[in-house]
Image (cartoon, rainbow, N blue to C red):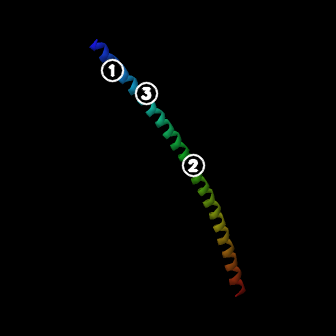
Amino acid sequence: LRQVTDRNVSLKTKDTLLDEKESLIELMREDNRTLMMENQKIIDEKKAVEEENFVMKQMLERLNQIDMQHEKKRKQIK
């Protein structure tokens, strides 16, 4: 009888541990999904900043060209 009781306790312990393991696996999956979404958000934000930087760089280059043209005209006038 003691062996049967010990075996039942052991099986219950195994079931409990398996349940805990499944719960932890599900929590890890949820954390992983959350991290993947956050990572994608960061990637999207980085892309937007890079695009904005590209446009700003083009605008700056154009302003520099205009500035050089004005400088040439100013020298011609003198």
Tell me residue 64's x, y (percent).
64, 72
Element type at marker 1?
A: helix
Q: Is residue 25 above or below residue 45?
A: above
Q: Residue 19 carries which label?
A: 3
Residue type (three-letter) at the residue carrying disc 1: Ser
Q: 3 or 35: nearer the eye?
A: 3
The quadrant holding residue 1 is: top left
Tell me residue 15's x, y (percent).
40, 23
Element type at marker 3?
A: helix
Please give left or right for residue 22 compared with residue 58 in the image. Answer: left
Question: Looking at the image, is mark 1 or mark 2 nearer the viewer?
Answer: 1
In this view, the residue farthest toward the bottom is: 78
Asked if marks 1 and 3 touch (Cβ < 8 Å), the reply is: no
The quadrant holding residue 63 is: bottom right
Question: Looking at the image, is mark 2 or mark 3 nearer the viewer?
Answer: 3
Q: Name the residue under label 2.
A: 41
